[in-house]
C-alpha cells in the first residue's frame, strides 16, 4: 500500500529531519567539550580529594559569569541565520566581527572575578585552602577564556550555515590533546614539570587556543567561507550590530546564569559539608552535565532553523499556497 503524507505533515517531517541532522553534530560537539572537562575531573581525582574539590569549586565559580558571556554571544546565531535566510550575505561578517569584539569586552569582568576568586569563595563559606588552590588553577585557566569565546562565535557562524561538523572534529582532537597535556603537566610526565592542579589550568588554556586557531584556519580556507573574509575590517565596531546581539542574547544569558547559578549554589552547599562531599559532588555533576548537552544541541539547531525561516519568505510562500489549496479541497469535499 502506497502511503502519501498530506502537505502539512510532509512539511513537518522535512523540518524534523532538518533539525535532527543539524542538532546531531552540535550535540556531539557539546558532548565532546564536556568530555574535556570530564578528563580534567578524572585526573584531578588521581591527585587527591583536595585537588578535585578545589578544581570543581573553582570551575563552577568560573562557569557562572562565563555562561552569561556565552549566552550573550549566542544572540549572534539567530541574527546570522536570518541574514542567510534573507540572502543578506554581506551582513554576516559584521555580525561575526562585532560578536568577537563583544567577547573581548566580556572577558575583562570575568577575568577579574576569576583572578580574585579566593576571597569571594571564602566569603561564601568555603575553606581557605580549597579556595586558594582553586584560585591558582583559575589564574591559568582564565588565559584561555578569550579564545574559548571566539571559538563559540565561530561555532555559531558554522551552525548558522548548517555545517557544524568541523566543530565536532576539532573538539575530538582537543579531547586527546587535553588528556595528553593533563597527563604530562599534572603529574610531571614526558619531561614536563609537575604542576599538580595548576597543570590542568595550563592544559585547558593551551587546548582552548588550539581549538580556536584550528577552527579559524578551517573557516579561512574552506571554499564556502573564504568569500566572507572574516578577518577583514577587524577594527570596525558597529554599535547597532552589537546592540542587536546583546538584545537577542540577553534572555539567553539570563537563563544560562540562572541555570549555572543553581548548580553553583549546590556546589557551595556541598562545600559547607566538607571537602569529601564537594569532591563527590564534582563527579556526580559531570554525569548530569553530559546528559544536559543533548537538549542544548537541539535548542541551538532550533534557533538556527527558526532564524533562517523567518526571512525566507519567497521559499515559504509556495508552501503556504499549497497548504491553502489542500485545505480548500478538503473543505470542498466535506460540503
Image (cartoon, grey):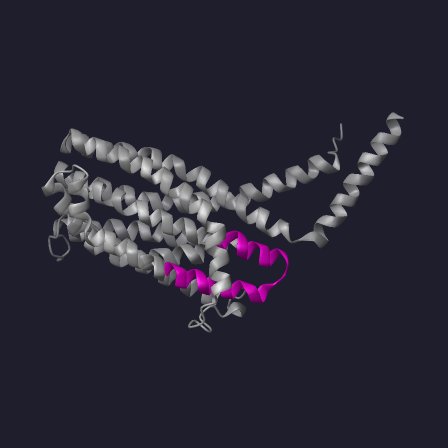
Please report the residue visible at 83 percent of the width from the left and 31 percent of the height from the top: 330
In which quadrant of the rendered view does residue 126 lie?
A: top left
Quadrant the N terminus occupies? top right
In the figure, is residue 274 to the left or right of 9? Answer: left
Q: Nearer the viewer, residue 31 or 296?
A: 296
Quadrant the C terminus occupies? top right
In percent of width and height, residue 12 lies at 65, 38
Q: Is 233 located above or below residue 317 in the figure?
A: below
Please report the residue visible at 31 percent of the width from the left and 45 percent of the height from the top: 64
In the figure, is residue 282 to the left or right of 253? Answer: left
- Residue 181 can be seen, yes or no: no
Please report the residue visible at 44 percent of the width from the left and 41 percent of the height from the top: 296
- Residue 123 can be seen, yes or no: yes
In the figure, is residue 60 to the left or right of 163? Answer: left
Q: Is 296 located above or below residue 241 in the figure?
A: above
In the figure, is residue 224 to the left or right of 57? Answer: right
Q: Magenta region: which residues? A: 76-103
In percent of width and height, residue 190 lies at 15, 55
Query: Is residue 79 found inside the magenta-colored segment of the image?
Result: yes
Q: Is 43 located above or below residue 101 in the figure?
A: above
In percent of width and height, residue 326 lies at 81, 37
Q: Nearer the viewer, residue 170 or 290?
A: 290
Q: Nearer the viewer, residue 59 or 238?
A: 238
Amino acid at each position: 500500500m502506497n502511503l502519501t503524507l498530506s502537505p502539512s505533515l510532509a512539511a513537518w517531517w522535512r523540518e524534523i529531519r532538518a533539525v535532527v541532522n543539524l542538532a546531531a553534530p552540535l550535540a556531539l560537539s557539546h558532548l565532546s567539550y564536556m568530555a574535556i572537562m570530564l578528563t580534567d575531573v578524572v585526573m584531578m581525582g588521581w591527585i587527591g580529594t583536595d585537588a578535585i574539590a578545589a578544581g570543581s569549586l573553582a570551575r563552577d565559580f568560573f562557569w557562572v559569569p562565563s555562561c552569561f558571556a556565552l549566552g550573550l554571544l549566542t544572540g549572534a546565531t539567530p541574527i546570522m541565520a536570518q541574514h542567510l535566510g534573507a540572502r543578506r550575505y554581506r551582513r554576516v561578517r559584521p555580525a561575526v566581527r562585532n560578536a568577537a569584539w563583544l567577547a573581548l569586552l566580556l572577558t575583562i569582568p570575568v577575568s577579574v572575578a576569576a583572578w580574585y576568586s579566593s576571597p569571594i569563595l571564602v566569603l561564601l563559606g568555603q575553606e581557605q585552602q580549597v579556595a586558594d588552590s582553586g584560585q591558582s588553577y583559575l589564574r591559568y585557566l582564565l588565559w584561555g577564556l578569550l579564545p574559548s569565546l571566539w571559538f563559540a562565535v565561530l561555532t555559531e557562524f558554522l551552525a548558522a550555515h548548517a555545517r557544524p561538523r568541523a566543530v565536532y572534529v576539532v573538539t575530538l582532537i582537543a579531547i586527546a590533546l587535553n588528556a595528553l597535556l593533563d597527563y604530562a603537566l599534572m603529574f610531571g610526565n614526558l619531561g614536563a614539570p609537575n604542576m599538580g592542579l595548576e597543570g590542568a589550568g595550563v592544559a585547558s588554556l593551551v587546548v582552548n587556543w588550539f581549538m580556536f586557531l584550528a577552527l579559524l584556519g578551517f573557516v579561512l580556507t574552506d571554499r564556502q567561507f573564504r568569500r566572507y573574509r572574516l578577518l577583514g575590517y577587524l577594527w570596525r565596531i558597529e554599535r547597532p550590530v552589537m546592540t542587536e546581539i546583546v538584545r537577542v542574547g540577553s534572555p539567553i544569558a539570563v537563563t544560562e546564569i540562572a541555570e549555572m547559578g543553581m548548580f553553583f549554589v549546590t556546589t557551595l552547599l556541598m562545600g559547607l559539608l566538607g571537602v569529601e562531599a564537594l569532591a563527590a559532588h564534582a563527579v556526580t555533576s559531570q554525569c548530569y552535565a553530559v546528559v544536559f548537552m543533548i537538549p542544548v544541541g537541539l535548542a541551538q539547531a532550533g534557533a538556527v532553523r527558526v532564524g533562517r525561516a523567518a526571512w525566507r519568505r519567497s521559499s515559504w510562500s509556495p508552501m503556504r499556497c499549497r497548504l491553502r489549496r489542500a485545505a480548500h479541497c478538503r473543505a470542498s469535499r466535506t460540503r
